[in-house]
Amino acid sequence: MLVNETLEEYVKDVSSSKPAPGGGSVSALVASLGVALSSMVYNLTIGRKFYDEYDSDIKDEIESGLKICERLISELMPLVDEDKKAYEDVIKAIKMPKNTDEEKALRSQKLDEAYLKAINVPLKLARLLSEGFAPTLLIAQYGNPNAISDAAVGALLLFAGLQSAYINVKVNAKFLKDKSLADSAVEECESLIKRYEPVKDEILNTSIKNL
Amino acid sequence: MLVNETLEEYVKDVSSSKPAPGGGSVSALVASLGVALSSMVYNLTIGRKFYDEYDSDIKDEIESGLKICERLISELMPLVDEDKKAYEDVIKAIKMPKNTDEEKALRSQKLDEAYLKAINVPLKLARLLSEGFAPTLLIAQYGNPNAISDAAVGALLLFAGLQSAYINVKVNAKFLKDKSLADSAVEECESLIKRYEPVKDEILNTSIKNL
């Protein structure tokens, strides 16, 4: 599994002429790293002196923010492998025989199923990533000032991941037979980008003013 | 070494309450992944039928583009560990005794040396990353159309890495004694962002019109 490769092996794997792992798998890793940076700021905040002085409702919010990050990481990391698998299934379907009408129909059906899976991975990535902005903003506002730059980098990576997920949704959308499903996936990503770009900027502004 | 950790271990390490690896180390990995995606598109281009039909000067440009990417990856990956080491040296210097004037002077000197190293890692990252935009643009223009989305994701990661490097330069700049050096490092990053943002956009436009 890719998640068990070393950083060095994975980067080498990406750069090789194998078409997978590619942009989809890498985006899932970048997303995980973005949320992991937020988690780190949470972990450098909870239990510190300044944290103990917060009101209990802010403490509660912070504690559930960390839980959201932990859940997101556990849901994002598997996508590093799932995207590769989805891509391989597309290739498998493309290589199916198409000599008879029956073979053609079966190939076409398998190919459509494979593209559906291939669009669903980056779509899931975009949705999960979107959930990462609120906890990152919260910890940029209330977190350990010594680690605030890590929340800013986290926000940059969440947004780059979201833009990358959009590109991967778009590249698979044109192959889907169900055009309304393809359009709605592309539109959903566009609206997530529009919605979370200002949150990313707010996180950056909050952090940078404290740098 | 961090580059020998698995993806899973590294993400866990980032998310933990250890302050390093943090945003600096992660940015170096993201930068490496961005260039690795460009490399992949080069490797899916060179030797293909459509490639053989290019003029020899375009082929030469493409071949040297791949070499630039390979060199960049080999220079970027070590920064994943160097950033952590630089951060640990800052912590070591902070913990030095400061009871006598002599101790204070030595601590102050070591701390300044450590912050200088800590600003130099993301500054080097920003410079190396900047070299990645031209080869990514080239391969977005001439590369395998089936992998063009990977060049787009590569460009997004290069730019997110550059913005992250800027944040890490800025956060260390305020601790440097040599203010003119600190200012010039921040300004250099700002000017690299200004210079390469339009190149990133050009890569995205070139790729997206072919999606």
Image: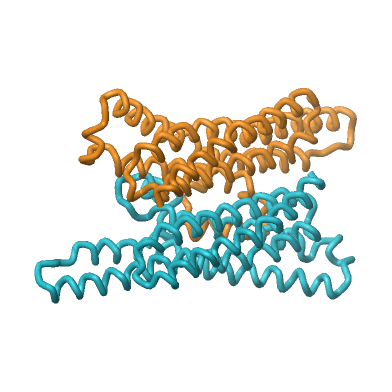
Chain colours: A cyan, B orange
Q: For this view, does A55 lie left or right of residue B186? A: right
- Residue drawn at (34%, 61%), measured in percent from left and top? A87
Q: Quadrant of residue A37?
A: bottom right
Vertical order, A173 against A155 (above or below): below
Residue at the far front in the pictured view: A180
Residue at the far left in the pictured view: A99
Report if residue A8 is visible in the image.
no
Vertical order, A85 against B197 (above or below): below
Q: Position of residue B30 (x, y in %)?
A: 53, 47
Report if residue B127 is visible in the image.
yes
Vertical order, A137 against B56 (above or below): below
Residue placed most toward the observer, A166 or B68: A166
- Residue drawn at (20%, 75%), measured in percent from left and top? A106
Residue placed most toward the observer, A127 or B39: A127
Q: Position of residue B73 (x, y in %)?
A: 45, 37
Q: Quadrant of residue A81?
A: bottom left
- Residue drawn at (76%, 28%), measured in percent from left and top? B183
- Residue drawn at (87%, 67%), measured in percent from left and top? A54
Q: For this view, does B170 lie left or right of residue A23? A: right
Q: Position of residue B158 (x, y in %)?
A: 53, 42
How many marks the image carries: the answer is 0
Q: Position of residue B153 (x, y in %)?
A: 48, 49
Q: Quadrant of residue B193?
A: top right
